[in-house]
Image (cartoon, rainbow, N blue to C red):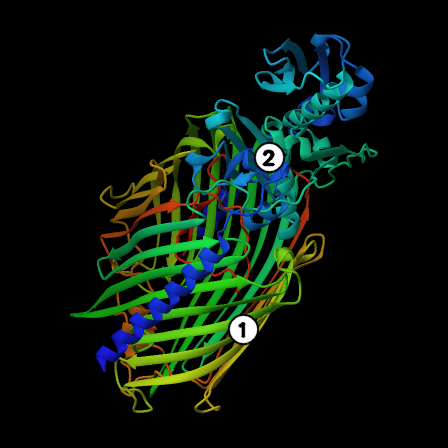
Amino acid sequence: MRKEKVRKIFLSLLLGFCLVFVLSARFSFPQEKSSDIEEMKKTAPKVFIDCGICDIDHIRTEITFVNYVRDRKEADVHVLVTSLRTGAQGREYTLAFIGQNRFEGIDDTHKYFTESTDTEDEIREGMAKALKVGLMSYVAKTPIASRIRLSYSDVVEETASEDKWNYWVFTISGDGQLSGEESYKSKSLSGSFNASRVTPDLKISLSLYGSHYQENFDYDSTSLESTQDSLSLGGLVVKSISDHWSYGAYFDSGSSTFENIKFGLTFQPALEYNLFPYSQSTRRQLRFLYKIGFDSVRYREETIYYKMKETLWEQSLSITFDIKEKWGSISTTLSGSHYFHDVSFYRLTLFNILNIQVVKGLNFFAFGGGSRIHDQFSLVKGDISLDEVLLKRTQLATGYDYFGAVGLSFTFGSIFTNVVNPRFGSHGYGGMQIIID
Amino acid sequence: MMKKNLLCGVLTFICLFLPAYAQTPSKGSAIQNGKPIVFFDWEGADFDLLKNTINFVDYAERADEAQINIQVTTREAESGNTEYTVSFIGQGDYEGDNDELKYSAAEDKPEIEKQKELAGLIKMSLMRYVGKTPISDRVSITFLDKVEPTDVEDKWNFWVFSLSADTFFSGEESYKSGMLNGSLSANRVTPELKIRMSFSAYIDDSRFKFEDQVIKSDSDSQTLSGLVVKSISEHWSVGGFFSATSSTYSNVKLALNPAPAIEYNAFPYSESTTHQLRFLYRLNYKSVRYREETIYEKTYENLWQQSLEIAFEVKKKWGTASASLDGSHYFHNFGKNRIRISGELSLRLFKGLDLNIYGRYSRIRDQLSLPREGLSVEEVLLRQKQLATSYQYSMSVGLSYTFGSLKSKVVNPRFGTGGRSISITM
């Protein structure tokens, strides 16, 4: 039986590979004599698009006068795209064009803005347009330039309307989800309201969020219902002092079944120093954020410290270092906090992300974090059921937590990624993509 | 106590920032408001030709009035060609933003032709500056030719190979988990033929400590898969899938599944990023060996199955919509079948109001691999093994309305952007 299986696998594999090679050989014959344009295409700039949020297939379909490569080291132009949220809840994309190889030293930076109401199609159209415009000065240095038509239509300038909202933006949203099968059902509901006003001098944001989550298991004679609710109201105000300094305050209030909190209130004035100018934030930052304030909490059930409510003062410092360059990115946050009434109640957290490409084709990423936890005031005194543990419905006593991931990939072979072939669907085949926001 | 704190907090919050709020944000620099101003330092230039070709800049009379100073020099090369060097020097708002262009024109080319071509290149190079002004919206760039994406010199003949390994672990005192994943792949994608092959293996292990007991949960799977698709026309493709899998979740020790397939797309494939309506038919042969005896008292079986998938996708200015319907049945017993329907819609109802709907429903009559032995409570709660069911559904609806100052382009990264998230797609 087993032998037969092995033979079957072997035969199918052999058949598969034969088919592959016969077909590939059949289609890899050199094409007929190249014409001028084919020669021009061969010398067109090689571009590496370093953008996790872009619709790459759309870019490849829209911009066909350059060659796309999968490895940054092969590229003549490395386009590094980073983004930040704008005051209007849209995005500001920064396109850094980094010249390499034959364009060594020729760098450029362009910006592209989206609005929160733009659809996916509008966003990708705009991005392709911004890329095209930015690539022009590189393309102009190669023969394919002669085959590009650039036109300009001088339409009447639309009059800029007064901003009657004075930079305020509001969002109301609601979400509902349902899923299930015979023995398992879940549903969730959430709603939120956000108001914000962002100017270079002052940032204000306020948000109200509520959610309800419920799961039902029904198996044999066991039936189980598990719910989790939370409600919160939060706010942040930040005033700019200089290119490096800011001050402000955080405000949070809410309840959570997970944390055994009936109602909690936190108010923390804060001060921040950034070693790099804030204007470089998407590429590099080293921020020191200090907060001091109080937590006032009312618990759902009595805690292991025999409390039903308490008000505690604490201070915290967090240090964030981010850098994104053409070789990859590093992002680290170290934060520590302690309570004043008893300094032995503290928490230390480290969070780190690393994503680098040093050698051609070799990609390495690692991310991880851990906490030393000595401040679980809200733990419930009573017993916890097995299902609460397995479903992670309640906070458990712990002195630490950690997570981590390491990955390595090596790619070799053809460097070009010009082709878009959507036939039989475009399933993901291996590979991993990490987007850090 | 709490109320007093709340009031005090809110008041401080307001007082602290009241004076600041009254200030209006600074205006953008002059550069944002119109066409770049250029000055040409070019002996013998035909200015009428230049102004006709490059109509999106203002021409300055003096170098110091310009934002971009363009210097053109010529030189006779040994070959007899005329070599032009164009230097773009940014001034004022464009200080430090410089570029250089070289152009070599054949000796016998008429002067007017040389200048025309050079003006065309200067026009393109100026996009470097125009891209930083609002007028870049009114520029349109078109490539006059249709080229094959495979017009490149590639010694690997479009083959790409990749090896990867990754691991993820997490834990606290009463809970630990770890995952290990490895894969190999070989791909070759050209417009005529798509070949994908991969092997991946996955192990997952977690432990819960509860009172005095430790609950362990493991699962692992290995998959070898392949796909070959040959393009027949803009609408038709043929090919085949192959997979060999092993999985603890679905009680499968080894399943072999070769499947020839054919696909028809009602829209041309070249428009796939905008819209597609694909009909994919597969004829599956499945040879399966189970880990535990199934509810049908089988430890292995060989079966034929056919399936049809209809997928529709459209991405337009107003939003994105997709829907798919897929059905399959076994030949030995037509009652063993499955139908799945799903749809997704992301729609801008009007400026500011977005609607997102997602739904999926499956009617399941083909769970051939269910083990005969029952499952433990832990296996159920941790969703470690598949359960008997005749349906599965999931849906979500989201509505969001944004209003206010929607044109603001201000970014302010102070105090961070509100937490950080990592999303990983595999």
Q: At label 1, which amino acid type do we have?
A: Arg
Residue lying furthest left in this view?
B212
In this view of the protein, which residue sits in the foreground, A334 or B19?
A334
Residue B232 vertical position relative to residue B136 in the rendered view, above or below? below
Q: Disc 2 or disc 1, which is closer to the eye? A: 2
Q: Mark 1 points at which residue?
A: B360
- The residue sitting at 60% across, 58% down in the picture is A173
Residue A337: x %, y % from top left: 31, 41
Image location of residue B134, percent across then percent down? 71, 32
Residue at image coords 56%, 63%: A175
Amino acid type of disc 2? Answer: Met
Q: Identify which residue, B362 or A277, lies in the foreground.
A: B362
In the rendering, which numbered label is found on residue A40? 2
Position of the N terminus of chain A by quadrant: bottom left
The image shows residue A245 at horizontal and vertical percentages of 46, 26
Q: Which of B389 and A166 is in front in this view?
A: B389
Mark 2 belongs to chain: A
